[in-house]
Image: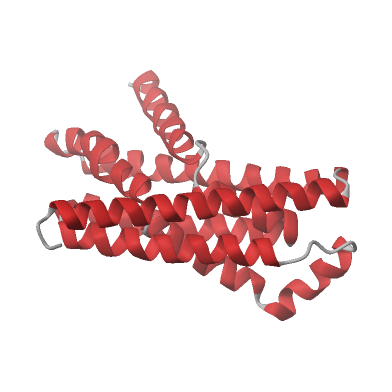
Amino acid sequence: MGKLMITLIVSSVVLGLSIAAPVGPINVEIMRRGLTYGFWPALCVGLGGMSSDLLLMGAMFFGLGTILAWTWVQVVLMLTGCVVLVHSGLASLWSRVSTEIAVEEARTKQRGVPLTSYLKGAVIACTNPMNILFWVSIYGSVLSGALQQENIFRSFLISSMVFIGIGLWNMNLAFFVHFGRYLMKLSVLKWVQNAAALVLIYYGLKFGWQGLMIFKESGWM
């Protein structure tokens, strides 16, 4: 029983890492914020994303995942994600990378960057169709297996370990980006920031196009 429990814990943490690790809007925004403002704003993006993940996890746990499969819900989420990501990418392209990172960090609290980072992470995560697909399909199937066995503790354990895995990835990425930027020259830092901005714009346009296609296929257009 002990080995089975350890295996369950490890596999659930790995599942959380697997959803958080692939390159996507949240990871790109964490990198962008980390390069520009430092560790805490980058981590706040991850925390915001985890807040949305927690809501989606709760929705799946209580059987509300079917709502996320409704066409009009998917269209609204995708179009909202399009606006948020394109705006973030354009704002990053227009912004400057400070030559004095310490000065930028000192101004972070006054600008409310951690709060805006948290909110942006939450919006990106809850409007990301790839993220929603994970919770509805992969996580839903894993959770349903545990619920069919009428084992609430097992279901709660799986959910908790998945969440911990996501948190570990976000923290490590924010930590790596924060200290990695001190090793970069300003020109390289700006290049990386612009590349991240273009990736965000790409995902935004992709989500917008997917939303319009779903809207068209539904016969509403």
- For this orientation, the residue located farthest to the front is 221
Percent across and percent down for residue 114 are 63, 69
Percent across and percent down for residue 10 are 45, 28
Q: Residue at x 43, y 66 (%)?
A: 83
- For this orientation, the residue located farthest to the bottom is 110
Residue 85 in view, yes or no: yes
Percent across and percent down for residue 133 are 29, 44
Q: Residue at x 40, y 27 (%)?
A: 11
- State whether residue 105 is above or below residue 8: below
74 with respect to 192 (left or right): left
Snapshot quadrant of residue 127 = bottom left
Q: Residue at x 12, y 55 (%)?
A: 218
102 with respect to 75 (left or right): right
The quadrant in which the N terminus is found is top left
Q: Nearer the viewer, residue 67 or 130?
A: 130
- State whether residue 95 is above or below residue 111: above
Snapshot quadrant of residue 183 = top right
Give the color scheme: rainbow, by chain, secondary structure or one colour. secondary structure
Q: Residue at x 50, y 36 (%)?
A: 22
Residue 63 in view, yes or no: no
29 with respect to 122 (left or right): right
Percent across and percent down for residue 62 are 19, 54
